[in-house]
Image (cartoon, grey):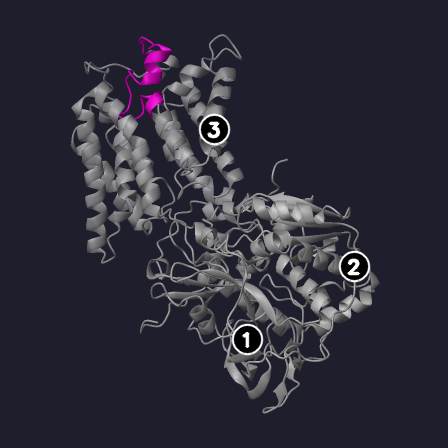
Amino acid sequence: MKSELPVVTSSPHLRSPVTVSALMRDVVIALLPALFAAVVFFGERAMMIVALGVLSAVVAEAGYQRLARRPVTVGDWSAVVTGMLLAFNLPPSAPWWLPVVGSAFAIVVAKQLFGGLGQNFINPALAARAMLMASWPAHMTAWIRPFDAVSTATPLAALVPKTGVAAQLPTYWEMFVGATAGCVGETSALALLVGGGYLLVRRVISWHTPAAFIGTVAVLTWVFGGVDGLFSGDWLRHILAGGLMLGAFFMATDYVTSPVTPKGKLIMGLGCGVLTVIIRLHGGFPEGVSYAILLMNLATPLIDRYVQPRPFGEVRKK
Amino acid sequence: MAAKTFSGGVQVPHYKELTEHLPIREGPRPTEVVIPLSQHTGAPCEPTVRRGERVLVGQKVGDSEAFVSAPVHASVSGKVVAIEPRPHPLGGEVLAVVIESDGEFAVHPEVKPLGPLEELSPEQIKRMLRESGMVGLGGAAFPTAVKVSPPEGKHIDVFLLNGAECEPYLTADHRLMVEHPEDVVLGMRALMKALGVGRGIVCVEDNKPDAIEAMKKATMPHSELEVAVCRTKYPQGSEKQLIKAVLGREVPPPPGLPLDVGVVVNNVGTAWAVARALTTGLPLVERVITVTGPCVAQPANLLVRIGTPFSSVVDFCGGFASAPAKIIMGGPMMGVAQRGLEVPVIKGTSGLLLLPEEDALAQQPQPCIRCGRCVEACPMGLLPLLLAAYAEQGRFEEAESLRALNCMECGSCSYICPARRPLVHAIRVAKADIMARLRARRK
């Protein structure tokens, strides 16, 4: 027996190998196909925006924690995820300072001021996107075509003509692979599905929120999204367009700002879907995914309060 | 047929390969045994022997008048050298009878086989269970005689024999089913006869195909018995989860018991011990334990005398392969960490697990990220993250309203938590406070 006393702790004495940083790293891995697609379609400027977003997020987190004399926790990879997601939500034409300001806002204002990891009540990347949208709307909506970087409109703007924007609708295939105008990381449904599938297989996220989100958008746009009356909407284009895939797999599933129970996650997805469609079809912006998620973030405490699992052995009161 | 299961729970690594194929061996012959007077759920015993007295194997050395209690017996022959408080593996010091062995293991003359089960009445079986100090050997050590005496008005229609053994590393029940299936069945039938139950199901996890095979063969001649195969998932061996998986019945929350849904559950080890008591007349003076873990030189399944110090057991297994940083009585999920090896094997000791430093280091908890894994893992349908948060803030009444008392402390939440939060520990703290207030209110 060695001289030190044995360690005495309460059970369990085994721990799962899955840690917070391993989960966050898996999210980063799952975002890589979309990053690759972004570079293919929008060139190295996409890479630069993502790099700046990540760098700014990590520096902001470390800097704030240093100043606040708190332990520096950038090793948990959560700032990297936030930086990537923020950058993915910017147009490829964004000036260099847009991801820098956005990531810093996401980390310092939306995350650290509320107590850091686990304490923020809205998705930091989406909060920063909303701030940038309100502050620099022109920069945030300057869309360019893939490959040649000519300015254009997004497929959604063409799909639901609200302001007389006339634009050529891309083909389903172009929308599926991502060869359309849009934010850095949102255009390729294919790449995002690969990443989302990875998260599902690795059990980082559950199917509830993405399935309910995408399913709701599909049904509602099919029913209400057409110009030839009910049930004539082009639902496939709607689920391939805009930030739906990115939002459904990577942002509505954010642990901290979404419900903890499976049923709550379904409600989260459903609510996001309904709000997205309302904004897309009737709102002032062509796209509504990010505001839908932000609104549902606010509803999360309420959902968690009322949607609780049934305790084993208890009979639900009628 | 699909394996039966329950909702919630976690997939844990088994680590059973260390001992699952090793036959049960006779354990050490201790020179001194320490018999704590409380080894069970219920009232502690009073010593029935005096210091200096000579005792024989199977002789009663402690008993109690209380209904919920179980006597304790000498596991060696020799001299009572002390009756004094001694360290107990469940913590603290407990009055114990210390017997110095004379090395003869002479059995008390009153120890005689009871005769064939067919000739015994339920009352005779119950008396035997009480007098032999029989308790549940799965861990909680609830007196078996009490378990087979349900209160008036409770109708029991099914008896479940728990051979799930869902704790990683442990293989004692597994080996009993493989090596002594007939005895396990005999003990099961005796318990069923005491209860007057006409249907019995042996429940085994599907990671023990040889045990399933053996139990199917052994139950074949008895039309009232069957074998149910459960999916391997922790905590399948929890009786509420076992009942849910096999019968689809849900035991009501505390103070609800399996008998409220017409079921009594007993452990495989208990059934085997009952059979031994019937066929040899020996009370519960030895049991099978698994001695295992990366730090044990020769892991083993051993038949060990109650009261044998852990140190003798480890020496018998060739000592340490490497210095252990953690010593656990029981399995790694619900076992109790020990301060050292001087404590004795008691009736509830299912295993002795020695873990190296890399498994023992406390990990720094990180903030909860609300991933919901604990909610999915909780087999009791609770919200561990909220219960633990309330507990940490001292908001015990809120924890109570979220059913903290329903928690059976299986530890699935702490196991799965990626932020390494001590969830079940916090819930235990809340439970202790809630129970203390309930007791105060009752007074």
Q: Amino acid at mark 3?
A: Ala
In which quadrant will I find the N terminus of chain A?
bottom left
The answer to whether residue B375 is above or below residue B435 is above
* Residue B40 placement (x, y as % from top left): 62, 71
Residue A313 visible in this rendered orientation of the protein: no
Q: CA distance from mark 3 to mark 2?
A: 53 Å
The answer, for residue B118, to whether it is visible in the render is yes
Residue B307 disc label: 1
Q: Which residues are magenta?
A: A165-191
Quadrant location, the C terminus of chain A: top right
Q: Relative to residue B223, is residue B55 drawn left or right?
A: left
Q: Which residue is mark 3?
A: A211
Which element is circle 1 on?
loop
Occupied quadrant, residue A95: top left
Q: Disc 2 marks which amino acid?
A: Lys
Q: Chain of mark 3?
A: A
The answer for which chain carries disc 1 is B
Looking at this view, is B419 or A294 the one in front? B419
Residue at image position (83%, 65%) is: B121
Q: Amino acid at mark 1?
A: Gly
